[in-house]
Structure formats: C-alpha cells, structure tokens
Image (spheres, rainbow, N blue to C red):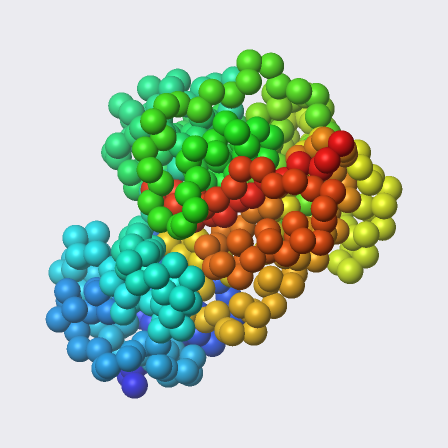
Amino acid sequence: MLKKNPASPPKLAAFEALWKELFSSPIHLDSALSKASRLHKSALAQAVPPILLRPTSLAEAAGVGVAPGEPWTLAPEALQDWAPARSMAARILDGALEPRRVPRSSLSDFPVPMIEDWTRDWGPKVAEVLAENLGVEPPLSVRVKQEVGAEALKKDWSPQLPVKVSVSDLSPVGVRLASYAPILNSEASERGDFEIQDEGSQVMAVFALWPEKVAHLLSPVPGPVKSAGKAVQLPESAPAWTVVDTCAGAGGKTLALADLLSGKGRVYAYDTSPRKLQALRRRGKRAGVNNIQAVALTEGKESETVKRFRRRAQAVLVDAPCSGWGVLRRNPDIKWRQDPETLTRMPEIQKRLLALYSDLVAPGGLLTFGVCTFRRAETIDIVEAFLKERPDFEKGPGGFLGPSPCDGFFMQSFRRKA
C-alpha cells in the first residue's frame, strides 16, 4: 500500500493526489490534468501519462519491482495506492528517469483481455505491433486553414519553436510537431489560423467528402500507415453541398469539413450536448467560419430531426461513439478502467446510429461510418451488418488508418444508390 509521506516533495504529493483521483472517480486524465494547479501541471503532465502508457516497461527501466500480473490484476481501490506508480513518478520528477528514452512498450503494458481481443481479431504479430505503437507519446498535430496553408505555417513556426515542425504526409491541411510546443501562445493562434487536431481526424474529414482522395492511405488491418507516396490533392473548387456531422461533439471534424468546403454549402453539426455545441460555436467564430449550423438533438428522439431532413444531404458523417482503442496514446487511462459492459454495448449503439442517420443521405450521396478504434466488432462487423440490412447502399472505399504516426481510425464509405 502507498503510504502518505508528510515529507513528500510538493510535486510528488500532487502526483499522489491526482493518481488517487483517477481511480476513485470517473474523471478522465485530460480533465484531471486541467484541474491541477498551475504550479504542478507541467510536472504532472510529464509523469502521469507515461506511467499510464507503459507501466511495466517504465518500471523495468527504473528498477522498480512489479508483482506478476500487476497492475492489471488489481481492483481500482488497490490501484489508488499502487506503490510502483509512486516510485516511477519520483524518478521521473527528479530527473532520474526520462520516459522518452525507455525502450518500446510491450504486450505486458496492456490488460490481458485487450491483448486477447487484438490477437483474436488480427493475430499475434499485429497485436505486438499495436502494443509497440500505442505505448508511445503521440506527436502534436494541427489542422491549418486552407487560406493560410500548411507550408506557410511550417515556415512561420520552424524558426520559433524548440521542436521539429513538418508538413503532414497524410493530411493535405496538416502540420506535425515532434512533441509539445507552446503554440497556443503564438500569433497564428490569436488569428485562428489552426486547430489542434490529430492527422487521422483530418483525414477522416477529407474522406467524408472525397473518399477516393485518401483511400490509398487505408489498410485492411490496423497498424502504421504506409508511405503516402504522393501528396493528397484537394479539388480546385469545392461543391456547395449539404453536409451533416451527426456526432459532432465540440466540432473538430465539423470545422474541418466547413473549411474543406471553402465556406460553401452548409455543414450541420448534430449533438445531444448543448455545452459541446456552444464550444463549437465559439471555435467557429474564432476561425471565421460561417457555413456551420449547430443542431441540438434530444437523446432518444433523434429520429424527429432526421424525419425533417430525410434524403437531403450530399454527405453524412457518422463518427460514432466507440471503445477508443485507437486513441490510447492520448487517453491511456481508458485501458485501466474500461469495463466489459462498455465493449458489449458499443456495437449496438453504432448500428443504431448508422441506421438512423443513413436516412439523411440523398440518392447518390455519401455516407461515412467512422470510429477511433480497431476492434473488429466495432468496424468490419458493423459494415457487414449494415450492408445486409440496407441494400439501397453500396460499399465504397474503407479500411484502417494507423495507429502511427496518427491515432488509430477505421472509416468506411457507402453511396446511396440513385
């Protein structure tokens, strides 16, 4: 058991408090870090995510003893006081352990049921690749407004920032930073020139409009993205389409869709959270986007809105809730707390949403199903079930994107038969 030490340095005491909160409440890592005091936030961001990402690999590198099967055999109550976590944090905070220098993660850094699922779906070799790529800190990526351009932002930032800046080789509107940099304090941020967004999310927005443009990036199995080969070329003139982002949240992909359309047409953002839609409105105003309309839905009564707009959209994106296994690099606490009930429930939610929102698609229009996971039950199985139930749609391009260098996604396009 972890014993409270009155003489603990303040930073280590802050770590202990945050670690306990993660396993005694439903709070997510990002929220917990955002609530931390400014005095300790940077230190906590340096220590907590790496321990959550690869606990056994870090422990071995730090010479910290971990009992066989731990931490995955422990209940949340025991995890609150998991002594190896405190020992690793102490070494990170005093500079004795640099997480980025630790050898790659291994299968033991993930819960046994998760590894079993990966192995059953994709085989042991893919499972090892996934473990290696989902146990490292992700780069920082941004989507650049088309009128600014990725090359121009890279040129602006390269001499200013202390990290490598490169134009994305996946997204035509992306810039990738090797690691964290204070970009929110930049003049480009004040002008609304960019949005922080993973390159995979950017690719999905392009895919929802023009799947053939990025289909070559997709693979039949999850894993590192192969070389793009050639830069993605967007259409010279965007269409004035009606587009619906049906699970918009705070609107990262909504904003991307609106910018990709060069302000033409109308992008409807559907969500059941008024708070998230309000955040989307603020972000749209800051970015100078005026072709977005946020639509608040009532959970369980979404069909009332769908009925009014049946068969009117040229493109519909169903970026559905999922297990989130593709974003474990950014949300490593998921693998510590996800319960079997959630995994069982997700495919039914996805099937319902895909069936519901497919009615928005106009004849000849596009429907895109997307999730940030690679579970077969939430990807290929959903596609097969939908096609079996809906002969009025035909299957288009689709597949897995990542994980590495972007987060892990699955996306599949369908076209409504004319």
Q: Quadrant of residue 55?
A: bottom left
- Quadrant the N terminus occupies: bottom left
Residue 48 in sight in this render: no
Q: How many marks?
A: 0
Q: Is residue 46 left or right of residue 348?
A: left
Q: Residue at x 50, y 27 (%)?
A: 213
Percent coordinates x, y for residue 399 in the rendering: 48, 44
- Identity of the residue furthest to the bottom in this view: 1
Q: Is residue 147 left or right of residue 138?
A: right
The image shows residue 16, relative to residue 284, as above or below, that is: below
Q: Is residue 277 left or right of residue 149?
A: right
- Quadrant the C terminus occupies: top right
Percent coordinates x, y for residue 102 in the rendering: 17, 57
Q: Residue at x 35, y 81 (%)?
A: 73
Percent coordinates x, y for residue 191 in the rendering: 51, 25
Percent coordinates x, y for residue 391 in the rendering: 72, 46
Which is nearer the eye, 384 or 315?
Answer: 384
The image shows residue 170, relative to residue 264, as above or below, that is: below
Residue 160 in sight in this render: yes
Q: Quadrant of residue 67?
A: bottom left
Q: Residue at x 78, y 60 (%)?
A: 300
Q: Residue at x 32, y 56 (%)?
A: 126
The image shows residue 90, relative to residue 72, as above or below, that is: above
